Image: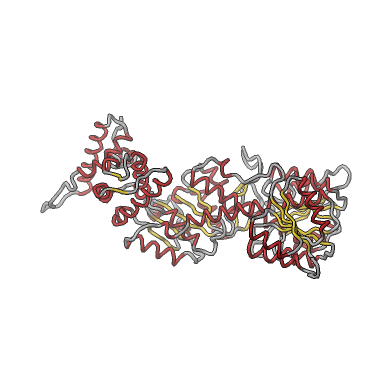
Amino acid sequence: MGVRYRVLAVDDDAGMRAVLEDVLSDAGYTVNAAGTLEEAYEFLKGRAFDVVVTDLRFREGAGTGMELLAWLRDNASPTPSIMITGHASVENAIEAMKLGAFDYVMKPFSNEEIRMAVKRAIEQRNVLRENAALRKDKVAREKVKPSVAKAPKIHKATGRILVVDDEASMRELLEIILGNAGYAVLSTPNLVKAHECLGAESFDVVITDLRMGNERTAGMGLLSWLHERAPATPAIMITAHGSIETAIEAMKLGAFDYIMKPFKNDEMRLLVKRAVEHGLILRENAALLKDQASLGKIDNILGTSAAILDVIDMIGRVATLPSTVAIHGESGTGKELVARAIHQLSDRAEKPFVAINCGGIPENLLESELFGHKRGSFTGAIEDKEGLFVVADGGTLFLDEIGEMPMALQVKLLRVLDNSSVMPVGGVAEIPVDVRILSATNRNLEEMVEQGRFRTDLYYRLNVIPIHVPALRDRADDIPLLARHFVQSHAVRMGRSVSEISPEAIEALCVFRWSGNVRELENALERAVALCNGTRIEISDLPRNIQNYLAMPKSIVTELPPGGVDLEALVADLEISLIKQALQQSKYSQKRAADLLGLTPRTLRYRLQKYGLDAE
């Protein structure tokens, strides 16, 4: 099974608890059992569970399973639940689903039935978790409003349903039941016509009978066809000839669920609603993974210089390894592009790539973001939260600006690397995780280790395979290629007709120092595309600091005196003089002064502090 998932079984019948423990333990799950709601709450407050299986009714005065579902919805929303009961009704099932239950299982149930329900609940939870991680990454990359990237919700019954059954009466019944519920229903009597329909248009759910005509397993053939050609389309098997073996085979072929004839109308409507929602989740997952894959293409790393080709070669060599990789380089060089390419070329490409900037979050929030927390563990922790290690389970976690991580959290990170498990803030049990760690920094970690500001043991665990991404000034031959790429992409995005860069503008770009590296180059060209009046970018369209750089003297000392020079003092004197002049000319506007000097405002502030200069 790989990761050993944890299940909480809640039932006041000791015999039923023992059955659930035995059946699910034999299937490879770690099972905790609770006889009362109070015991269940205590378990849930200290541990993270992958599934909760609960009885509907408890002894009089001891509460109900519905109360537990409501508690899970309000306090541990990522945790799927399954309701089991011997007192079933469609009304109870609908109420349970409204409270967030994943499934509803009738007593007595077979061992395989409960195992399949738990397996499906975990599979859907994992897809939902992946989608949340991919959505969060999309928001961070595109800087869109979070609401834009939320999961789709169904507010009313919508969708196209294909019904495949050789009985005209059954096709008519399903057309009426589902049509009245708001679905568009198309029905067909055999597999040949079903294949024609599926080849011509897409459906949100396929409902198929098991037996049709003389074919005793015709429905299985359709499930197999769907599994190969339309895996994101949920299928429901209906039959009057049911057995648990048939159900298991149907599930293996990708069926979403299995229902016996005769069924209640509400039962079918509820099942179709769940299947439509499941299909939306799967399609969102496929779209998000496709979007993530496009960002991780090795072709996204542009350049033909020897320096960048060495990086590309190293990416290909390390991608399939399980080792940690530390990506070094100045800000703006494209370290995250390298990390995404490593992920996409690895065997984890179908799982999430989750990135976090360790320097952009306060220490107390960073701990919760990485490791998660339990409800009530600190002020403001109103519900359980899964950390990014758990969210990235099976995939890759990219720790950007790792040099900014506080020492206290470095200890916890080292423990995760050693044990492959995380302890949420306020938790009492560790959660096993399978995550590959990639890190990046623009700091000199070796110096930080010597200064006692970064742990030696963590440094060696992260730096198993180092990759250095060169500064743009060290790969100046790539600037024309990069420049044309950025002009083209921004022109398309803005709807501008700009398509060329003049030779003079290219020369200016090539000689400029680019302290902000590729990111600064892209920003400069985005501005140029936005302000360009024609179809070709001229030197006058470039930022003023780039234009001015051409006129600056390229050397101050043309010959080395016989007695040598104090190079550091000479450079410092020159920088101080030019910074003072820039501040005076800009009337002490740091932004304008930075432009005059060809620096980013952040770099200028660093030099002001370094030389103790007054910016006012």
Task: Using the image, determine if residue 527 lies above or below residue 102.
Answer: above
Locate the C terminus by quadrant: top left
In this view of the protein, can residue 156 be seen by the observer? yes
Colour scheme shown: secondary structure
Q: In terms of depth relative to the viewer, which is nearer, 193 or 240?
A: 193
Apparent side of residue 434 relative to residue 567 in the rendered image (left or right): right
Which quarter of the picture shows residue 419? bottom right
Residue 575: percent from the left, percent from the top? 24, 41
Apparent side of residue 411 relative to residue 552 in the rendered image (left or right): right
Which quarter of the picture shows residue 301? bottom left
Residue 118: percent from the left, percent from the top? 73, 58
Q: In terms of depth relative to the viewer, which is nearer, 22 or 232?
A: 232
Question: In the rendered picture of this protein, how many numbered marks are placed on residues?
Answer: 0
Residue visible at 60% across and 48% down?
372
Residue visible at 79% across and 68% down?
245
Q: In terms of depth relative to the viewer, which is nearer, 560 or 170?
A: 170
In this view of the protein, can residue 114 be seen by the observer? no
Residue 131: percent from the left, percent from the top? 60, 51
Q: In terms of depth relative to the viewer, which is nearer, 493 or 133?
A: 493
Which quarter of the picture shows residue 228? bottom right
Residue 401: percent from the left, percent from the top? 44, 49
Locate the N terminus by quadrant: bottom right
Residue visible at 81% across and 65% down?
244
Task: Using the image, determine if residue 574 lies above or below residue 32.
Answer: above
Apparent side of residue 100 relative to residue 323 in the rendered image (left or right): right
